[in-house]
């Protein structure tokens, strides 16, 4: 589907809108206690650019969980949200509350298309008047509600299929003849395979927005062969839709309602275009004002605009998980500790702690890219590793380009047999 005017803004228009929106979002964050504590001394009016935003701390999921655990019974959202209900500390009432594994609770506010799914659905070809067969779970987590709210914002009708009950869902698909599907790609495949086995024809189903799982090109092509053009959306229960695929199928376009940064795992340091790192998201949502929320997912920024005419940034899609914490010789080592070596030794380009060996015989090696072999650098890096991680390990200096661009700072190669 063709992009909207908001999606085709010029760089100048986008920067001007950002300069207005960012201070308001920082001010909204200062109105909730947990974010106010994290942002002590920050002047909201001064945060008008991506560079200014990058100086604020990253909030990671384990911090949300720790805050919620510390305030069970008094504030379900750990002081990070303006929403709640009568027995909770809140500025405004929540429409719904969800539970993700942890348990971690997420709020939903009253706004239309609260999770920003409509733009992703529009890009996938969903239109007003379509019937959408929604096979995300309506139980505990927000997946189904994310899609339902987006479909309603577009003027679609929704069949709440939920998960499981394959035979009943197939019956509904045959009787109701929906134009579109929302759900996981694997369940869509199960439905189509089961339909073929039982001789059911599903001629109406032509388009799909899938999420919640990896969506490899092989499955995309398998669905196309059966008449369903499926596109993927990248979303989380914390911040909603982050990015989505277009008909160009060249990466995922970042949604207009969020900002995405790619940072070095374990840090808040923004990486240059093309480098793989952790996806960090800032939303423009005063109800749940997430500033620099670390998703724990890996991706990278793609160069240039989308061929469809959308001018916002694009990312490669999901490339793995950023949390690479490992226990080495009885000590926990975090990606942020390995990244600290780059600050101490600017001669280094990429670094990676490789842990080999077998159980109870860990053999860590710090691999580091550098131009040439500066005298004394190997010993200095080894000393820094001991100082930061308390580990003694071999240091290998490598020429630039030796380490893969995959966002890994810690690689566990140990055998656990």
Image: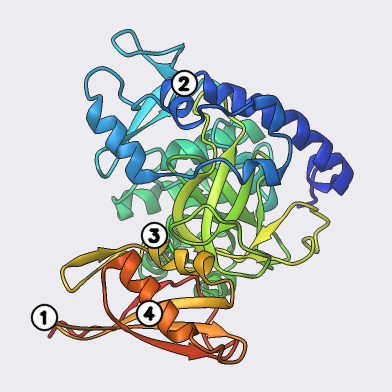
Q: CA distance from mark 1 to mark 3?
A: 42 Å
Residue 360: give its label. 1
Q: Could you say where residue 415 lies in the image, as x and y percent from the top left?
A: 19, 85
CA distance for labels 1 and 2 = 46 Å
Residue in the picture at 55% in, 30% down: 114
Q: In which quarter of the view is residue 34 placed?
A: top left
Please tell me which residue is depicted at 85% across the width and 48% down the height of the picture: 11
**Local SS, label 2:** loop
Task: First in sequence, mark 4 or 2: give its number.
Answer: 2
Q: Is residue 283 visible?
A: yes
Q: Are marks 4 and 2 in contact (CB under 8 Å)?
A: no
Q: Position of residue 126 (x, y in %)?
A: 65, 47
The residue labelled by disc 4 is: 382
| Mark 3, other Cα within 10 Å: few <14 / some 14–19 / many ≥20 | some
Q: Quadrant of residue 221?
A: bottom right
Give the number of the mark in front: 1 or 3. 1
- Indicate which disc, 1 or 2, sits on the residue closer to the N terminus: 2
Query: What is the secondary structure assignment of the residue under circle 1?
Result: loop
Q: Which residue is rendered at x = 37% and y = 64% of the image?
A: 190
Cα separation between marks 4 and 2:
43 Å
Q: Is residue 181 left or right of residue 371?
A: left
Q: In 3D space, how far apart are the residues under numbered discs 3 and 2 (Cα atoms)? A: 39 Å
Q: Position of residue 143 (x, y in %)?
A: 42, 43
User: Is 393 on the left or on the right of 283, as rendered?
Assistant: left
| 100 with respect to 60 (left or right) | left
Hey, which residue is sitting farthest front in the picture? 376
**Compared to 240, does 220 lie above or below?**
below
> Mark 2 = which residue?
32
What residue is pinned by disc 3? 187
């Amino acid at each position: 589907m063709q992009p909207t005017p908001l999606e085709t803004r010029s760089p100048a228009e986008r920067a001007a809108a950002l300069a207005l929106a960012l201070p308001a979002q920082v001010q909204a964050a200062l109105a909730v206690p947990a974010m106010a504590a994290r942002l002590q001394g920050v002047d909201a009016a001064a945060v008008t650019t991506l560079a200014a935003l990058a100086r604020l701390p990253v909030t990671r999921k384990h911090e949300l969980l720790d805050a919620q655990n510390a305030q069970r019974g008094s504030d379900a959202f750990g002081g990070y949200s303006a929403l709640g209900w009568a027995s909770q500390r809140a500025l405004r009432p929540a429409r719904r509350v969800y539970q993700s594994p942890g348990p971690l609770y997420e709020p939903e506010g009253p706004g239309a298309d609260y999770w920003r799914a409509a733009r992703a659905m529009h890009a996938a070809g969903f239109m007003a008047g379509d019937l959408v067969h929604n096979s995300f779970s309506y139980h505990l987590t927000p997946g189904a509600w994310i899609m339902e709210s987006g479909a309603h914002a577009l003027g679609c009708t929704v069949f709440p299929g939920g998960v499981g009950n394959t035979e009943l869902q197939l019956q509904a698909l045959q009787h109701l003849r929906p134009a579109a599907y929302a759900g996981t790609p694997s369940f869509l495949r199960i439905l189509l395979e089961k339909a073929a086995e039982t001789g059911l024809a599903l001629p109406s189903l032509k388009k799909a927005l899938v999420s919640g799982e990896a969506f490899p090109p092989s499955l995309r092509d398998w669905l196309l062969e059966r008449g369903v053009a499926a596109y993927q959306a990248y979303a989380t229960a914390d911040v909603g839709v982050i990015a989505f695929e277009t008909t160009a199928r060249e990466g995922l376009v970042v949604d207009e309602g969020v900002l995405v940064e790619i940072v070095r795992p374990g840090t808040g340091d923004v990486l240059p275009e093309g480098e793989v790192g952790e996806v960090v998201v800032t939303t423009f949502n005063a109800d749940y004002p997430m500033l620099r929320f670390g998703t724990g997912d890996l991706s990278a920024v793609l160069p240039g605009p989308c061929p469809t005419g959308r001018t916002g940034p694009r990312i490669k899609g999901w490339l793995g998980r950023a949390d690479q914490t490992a226990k080495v010789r009885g000590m926990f080592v975090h990606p942020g500790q390995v990244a600290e070596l780059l600050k101490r030794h600017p001669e280094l380009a990429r670094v990676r702690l490789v842990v080999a060996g077998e159980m109870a015989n860990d053999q860590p090696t710090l691999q580091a890219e550098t131009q040439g072999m500066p005298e004394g650098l190997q010993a200095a890096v080894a000393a820094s590793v001991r100082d930061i991680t308390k580990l003694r390990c071999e240091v290998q200096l490598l020429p630039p380009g030796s380490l893969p661009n995959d966002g890994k700072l810690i690689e566990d190669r140990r055998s656990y047999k």
